[in-house]
Image: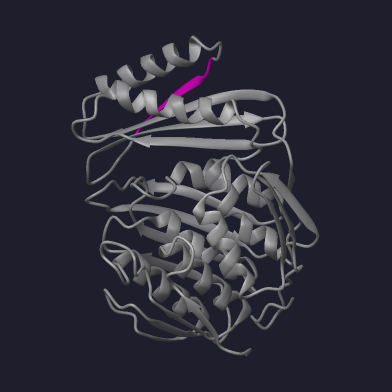
Amino acid sequence: MGNRIVIDGNIGEGGGQVLRTSLSLAALLQRPLEIHNIRQSRSRPGLRPQHLAAARALATVTGAELTGDRENSSSLSFAPRGITGGNYRFRIGTAGSVTLLAAALLPPLLFAPRPSTLVLEGGTHVPFSPVFHYLRDVFLPFLRRMGGKVEAVLDRWGWYPRGGGACTIRITPCRSLRALQVPRRGRLHGLTLTMGLAGLPLHIVDREEMRVRTCLGEKGYAFAGRFEAAPSPGQGNVLFLRAEYEESLAGFSVLGKRGRPAEQVADELCRQWLSFEEGPGSVDRHLADQILLYMALARGDSQLTAEELTSHLTTNVQVIRQFLPVRFSVDHETRFVAVSGVGQHSCENGVPQA
């Protein structure tokens, strides 16, 4: 086991991503970790239930010694002992995001000595996190392009504030990851609009679809619409637009909420995608920071052009550099991101090797 790494949880954007990336890399590399000042600048600083769920889940799959894992704690100590694939069920206990929990668990389990099946319970379509459809239909296809074989199934929808959703994720370990080359997106091949609704009148999605069709139609675009009934213990509404390009994918989502007219939800979705379509980005702003860790772990040189260089992306660069000897090149004018990865490899005893 390597030397202990100490992370200031308030670096960069200072949010939960610092914690998740640090824990993921500590678990993968089998490095003891101390992290302080967790979410210090947030209105409710310290560990929230979704962050505790990630820390405890990673401790379970690595046999780690974990201290400081209590709600509102500002410090955490994590000492892993190996990576164990297998079948796991993790409950966040609130509407905390299952996709963010998955983001923490995937890196080490991709290099585990045997396959894993995860059942994650919490929020599947909640604010301030990727919705499940983004994970399944945008992020995972990019990960598979790199050689990461992961499949996800939505079992039950979970909305804020009730939660109660669930998804199943199946992970086939890989020996190593290939570099990702997405310098440009190429021609638009098609748009697919998914409309999810639970416990609310059907006219909401009818109005949303009509508004999106009108808005995009005025710009010369058409899409395939797909309605999904959303079995759930709570109420909710989501629009998710998937854009398929010659060399890339992008995803955009907006959640409905009480007091927000359906037309406003639709307008926001159109604004998001049209802004991306009119810019030079090869990937959307969320994919750019989410795939960065895998680019750092891959063998060879990866590159992409980000829709936007978000604080999440620049923060991830800062955190990853404290764990791995990775070369990043970020051009703030062109938003071009290049990464020379370390070529991480798995091994049979549960301790991956670079």
Query: To which quarter of the image does residue 15 belong?
Result: bottom left
User: Can residue 341 be seen here?
Assistant: yes
Task: Identify the residue at horizontal 61%, vertical 30% (top origin).
Answer: 279
The residue closer to the viewer here, 104 or 128, is: 128
Magenta residues, dominant SS class: strand
Say if 113 sits above or below 316 in the image. below
Left or right placement of residue 210 versus residue 2 in this view: left
- Name the foreground residue: 163 vs 276: 276
Residue 256 in the image, given as x and y percentages of width and height: 29, 34
Q: Looking at the rendering, in which quadrant would you find the C terminus? A: bottom right
In the depicted structure, whether residue 214 falls above or below residue 65: above
Q: Is residue 324 magenta?
A: no
Q: Where residue 172 appears, x then y in whole percent?
A: 63, 61
Magenta region, residue range: 222-229
Which quadrant is home to the N terminus? bottom right
Whether residue 150 sits left or right of residue 61 in the image: it is right
